[in-house]
Image (cartoon, coloured by chain):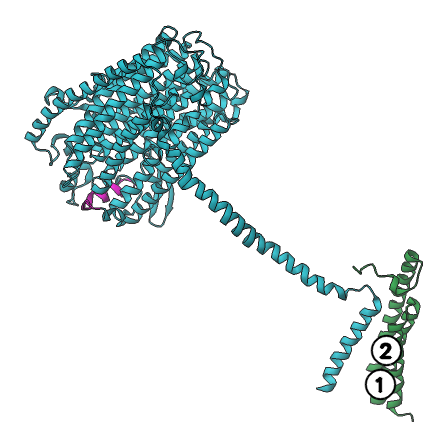
Chain colours: A cyan, B green
Amino acid sequence: MSPSTNLAAIILAPLAGAIVLGLFGKRMGERAIGVIACSTVAASALLSFYAFFTHLHALEAGERISAPLFTWVKAGSFRADVSLLLDPLSGIYILFITFIGFWIHVFATGYMRGDSGYWRFFAYLNLFMFAMLVLVLADNFLLMFVGWEGVGLCSYLLIGYYFTKDFANDAAKKAFIVNRVGDFGFALGVMLLFLKSGSVFFFTDGSRGVTGAFDWALMQTADPLTASAIFAGGITTIAVLLFVGACGKSAQIPLFVWLPDAMAGPTPVSALIHAATMVTAGVYMVSRASWIYVKAPSAMMIVAIIGAATALFAATIAIAQWDIKKVLAYSTISQLGYMFLACGVGAFGAGIFHVFTHAFFKALLFLGAGSVIVGMHHVQEMQRMGGLKKYMPWTFRTMAVGWLAIAGFPLLSGFFSKDEILFKTLTSDAFEGVHLLPKVLWVVGAGTALLTAVYMTRLMVLTFWGKERFSENGASHADHGSEHSHHAAPSRESPPSMVVPLVVLAVGAITAGWVGVPEGLSGGHVRNYFEHFLRPAIAERGQAADAADASVPVRETFRDAESVEPPFKKRDVVNENHDIEIALTVVSSVIAIGGLVIGWIWFRRKPLWQPPRLLEEKYHVDEAYDAAIVEPIKQGSSSLLWKIIDIRIIDGAVNGAAALAASVGGVIRHLQSGLARSYVAMVVFGALLIIGYFVIR
Amino acid sequence: MIPLSWYLGLSALLFTIGAVGVFIKRNAITIFLCIELMLNAVNLTFVSLSGYFGDMGGQLFVFIVMTVAAAEAAVGLAIIISIFRNRESLNVDDADAMKL
C-alpha cells in the first residue's frame, strides 16, 4: 500500500461511516449502526498502526512521509494542497486518536443504548474522527484549519446532542462562540504567517515545489524577550495569535469557560472530544508550530504563564465541584494547562508526552464516570453516590487505575509525563534574564500536582467509598442531572461493551508512560524513547544556529539530530541535570503520594466537606464574563443597534421612502378628480400655455 | 371674394363654441357633438388655408381628420352606450370611479 493510499484511507474510513450513518442510519437497527460506526474507526486504527509501524524506521531517522492528494487552492503566490503528512508528531497523534477513539465508540454502543438519536450520535462521532484526523495529518495550515473547524462543529453538534434541553443548547452555543474567538486569532496568525513567509505549508517539499513556513521561521533571528515584540507584527505576533487559537480549542485562561459546560453532552463525547483528543489540538498546533515559537521567547513566556495559571486555577475549582463530570472537566483544563506549561518552557516533547498519557487516563476516568452515571440512573452529583465499590467492581478497579495515574503515582503513566514536565520547567533556559520564572512555574506546577491528587481522591472517595447516600437529597447543588433521577441504588455493573473498553484503557493508563521513561531515572543510560522519537518533528531552541546557514537543506539537519546532541546542551550539563531529575522524581512521588494520603484522610473523615463558596462557584468567572462581555453586548444590541440603528435608521429609511411617496401622492391625487371636464380644462390650459409661449416669444 | 380672415374667424368661433360646450355641458352626447364641432372647425381652417396657398396638402389632411373622427365617433358612442348601461345616466359627472 502506497503511503498516499494508506494515509487517505485513514481519514476517509470514518468519513464513509459518517456519510452512511447520516444518510441511512435512521432506518437501521442499533446493532448495525454500532457495527458500522465501530468498524470504520477500527479500520482507521488498523491503517494508522500499519502506516506508523511500516514507516517506523524512516520516522525514527527523521524522514517525513508525505501524501499529496491534490492541489486545493492556487491563486497567485498562495497555494494550499489537500495533502497529508506523517511524521513523528502526527504519527503519535493518529495512533492514540484512533485507538482510544475506537474503544470509546465501543463504550458508546453500550452507553447510548435505547437512545432515540443513536444513529445521529454515531454519525457525528464518526465525523468527528474524520475531522480530527484531518487536523493532525494536514501538512499545511489551511487544511489543518479545515480539521480544526470540523472538530469544532462536531463538538458543537455533540454538546447539543440533547437538543430538546435548553442547557445543552446553551452549552453548545457557548462552546461554539468561545471557540470562534480563538479561531479568529488562529486565522489571523495564519494570515500573518503567509504574509511574512509566503507559504502556509509546514515544511519544504521540493518534489511538489512548495516552500515551508517553518523553514522560513528557521532562518529568522529570534525576537527579543520584550513586550513590544508581541505587537511588532513579526514572528512573535504570529506565535501569540496562534496561541489565541490554541487557548480557545484547548480551554485555557481566558477562554476555558466553555469546557465545563460542554459536559452537557453524552459522557463518551466528553471522554473522546473534551478530554482525550480535540482539546489537545491546541497543544498539537503549538508543538507543530514549535519552529515559530522557539524564535519568539515572549510568546513562549505567555504560553508558559497561561498554562501554569490555568493548571492551578482549574485545579482549585475542581476540588470544590459536586458533579462528577465537572470535576473531570476542570481536571482536564488543569492538565491541559500542564501541557502548555511544557510547551512554554520549550519542552514540546514533554507536552506531547503528557497529551499521550493524559488521553489514556482521562478517557478512562470519563468512561468510568459514564459507567457510574449509567449505574446511578443518571445521577451525577457525588453527594448522592458513595459506596459504589461493591456494586460496580470493574468500574471501580479501572477508575482506581485512572485515579492513581492522573495523581502521578509512581510508575503509572501520569507519573512519567508530569515528572518530565516539572523537570523541564525547573531546568528551562527559555527565559534568559528572568531566572526566577522557571522556579515560580515549577512551584505552581508542583502545587497543582498536589491538588490534582487531592481532588481526584475526593472524587474516588465520594463515589466509591463511604456510606451509600443514594436517597439523600442533594438538590441544593443539583445540576441538570437531577431532572431524571429516581433515588435508586445502582442495580448492577455496566454491560461488557462498557467494561471492556475500561479495562483496555486501564492497561493503557498503566503502561502508556513506559515509552517515555525520563533519561535521568536510569542515569542517562536508557534514552527517553518518546522524546527522542519526536525530536525531528519538534524545533529546539538553538537549532536555528546550525541551520541558519541557508545552503544546508533542512532535511539534512534532522538526520544529523539523531547523532548530534543539541548544541545548547553540553555533556556535563546533561549529567548534572540527571541528578536534578532523580531528585525531582522523588519530590514529585512524595507530592503525589502525599496528595493521595491527604485526600484520603480528609475525605474519608468528612466526605461532604463544604468547600469554600468562591471555589464552588468557580470564582464567578462566568458571572464576570456575563457582566463584562455578554451584558454589554446585549445592552448595546438592544439599546443602540436595535432601538436606534435598526428602528430609527434602517427602518426609518425604508418607512421614510414609503411615507415620502405617500405624502407626495396625497397632494397630487387631488388632480385626479374623476371629473372628465376638469381633465379637459387641464388639456386646454396646457395647450393655451404652449401656444401662448410661442405667440409671446 | 371672401377674405381669408373671415374663414379663420368663423373657424375660431366654431372651435370656441365647441371648447366651451365641452367645459360646461354634462350630457355625454352633447360633449361628443361639441368635440365634433371642434374637429370641423379645424377642418375649416385646413381647407381655407389650402385654397389660399393653392396647396392640396391641407385638403388631403381633412380627409384623414374625417376618417379619424368617424372611427372616434364609433368608439366614443360605444363607450357612451356602455356607460349608460352601467349607470343609467349620461351625465359625465356620474362617471367618477377614479375619484378617491
The magenta stretch is A206-226
A625 horizontally vs A684: left or right: left
Q: Is residue A90 part of the magenta span, yes or no?
A: no
For residue B60, what is the image quadrant? Answer: bottom right
- Quadrant in which the N terminus of chain A is drawn: top left
Label located before the other in sequence (2 or 1)? 1
How far is the residue under mark 2 from the one under mark 1? Answer: 10 Å
Q: Which residue is mark 1?
A: B50
Location of residue A307 in the rendering, given as x and y in whole percent from the top left corner: 27, 33
Residue A656 sits above or below residue A396 on the image:
below
The foreground one among A174 and A322 is A322
Chain identity of mark 1: B
Q: Is residue A354 visible?
A: yes
Residue A301 sits above or below residue A696 on the image:
above
Q: Residue at x 40, y 41 (%)?
A: A628
Q: Is residue A63 visible?
A: no
Location of residue A684 in the rendering, given as x and y in whole percent from the top left corner: 80, 75
Instruction: Name the residue furthest bottom.
Output: B1
The foreground one among A526 and B65 is A526
The foreground one among A630 and B91 is A630
Q: Is residue A216 part of the magenta span, yes or no?
A: yes
Q: How dense is the environment of label 2, judged by Cα within 10 Å: few (below 14), some, or many (20 and up)?
A: some
Q: Are marks 2 and 1 in contact (CB under 8 Å)?
A: yes
Q: Which residue is mark 2?
A: B62
Instruction: Name the residue furthest left.
Output: A572
Q: Secondary structure at mark 1?
A: helix
The foreground one among A563 and A386 is A386
Q: Amino acid at mark 1?
A: Ser
Q: Amino acid at mark 2?
A: Val
The majority secondary structure of the magenta stretch comes to loop
